[in-house]
Image (cartoon, rainbow, N blue to C red):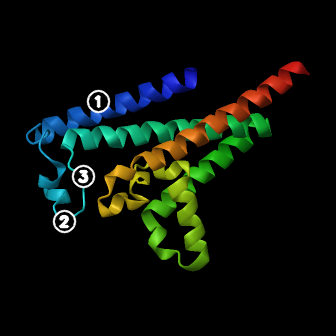
Amino acid sequence: MFTIVYCAVVVSVIGVVSLLVNCSSFGFEGALSPIGECVYFRDAALPTMSNIAYCILQYVFLFLGTLYFAGFVLLLAALTKRTALTIFLCGTSYLICMLYEYAGHIFAGIFGSVLGFFYRFGFGGYLLQASYSWSNLGQGLWTDVWKPILLVAIIIVLEFSGLWLICRRRARK
């Protein structure tokens, strides 16, 4: 429960600060207008939702990504029992996600496909708010937005269930 509350607080603080910074820079003009009217999204196939609803959707994916990453860190820490190794493995995996986000176009062939798969379905795609465009969402079929949400929800439940089983087994010993 602490992990869920902590992730929610962190994402909320990030969301509030970014909204305040953007509001002070650009204002809330057009926040309730459809996202298709936004200059940045005119040529994209986007849903008929408001700009603020699209912003909230992005923060939902960020929250899911933080839970996904937190579950990964906790599970890895429980399995390795080594703080330095856990920090190294988690930092390296996050660094690989960032590398793919910014330089993924240079990877070709099977290696690029494998990296792309792990990025889209891993915590990196959710943390960097790119996972909601991995399926038909990029073509404007936003009725499928539930698919990546359901996928990450199942993965998060499996991570925390595995962590609970590991901790319970150790408590019996």
Q: Residue pushed farthest bottom?
A: 109
| Disc nearer the start of the sequence (3/1) | 1
Residue drawn at x 23%, y 63% is 44
Mark 1 neighbour class, 10 Å CA radius: few under 14, some 14 to 19, many 20 or more: few
Residue 129 versus residue 148: which sits nearer the camera?
148
- What amino acid type should be assigned to the residue bearing mark 3? Pro
Disc 3: which residue: 47
Q: Is residue 9 left or right of residue 71?
A: left
Residues at marks 3 and 2 touching, judged by CB atoms closer than 8 Å: no
Disc 2: which residue: 43
Q: Residue pushed farthest front?
A: 143
Residue drawn at x 35%, y 33% is 14
Q: Is residue 157 left or right of residue 27?
A: right
For numbered disc 2, what is the local secondary structure?
A: loop
- What amino acid type should be assigned to the residue bearing mark 2? Asp
Mark 3 neighbour class, 10 Å CA radius: few under 14, some 14 to 19, many 20 or more: some
Image coords of residue 59 (percent x, y):
36, 38
Whole-number angstrom distance, CA of label 3 to CA of label 2: 12 Å
For numbered disc 1, what is the local secondary structure?
A: helix
| Disc nearer the start of the sequence (2/1) | 1
Image coords of residue 39 (percent x, y):
13, 57
Quadrant where the C terminus sits is top right
Disc 1: which residue: 16
- What amino acid type should be assigned to the residue bearing mark 1? Val
Residues at marks 2 and 1 touching, judged by CB atoms closer than 8 Å: no
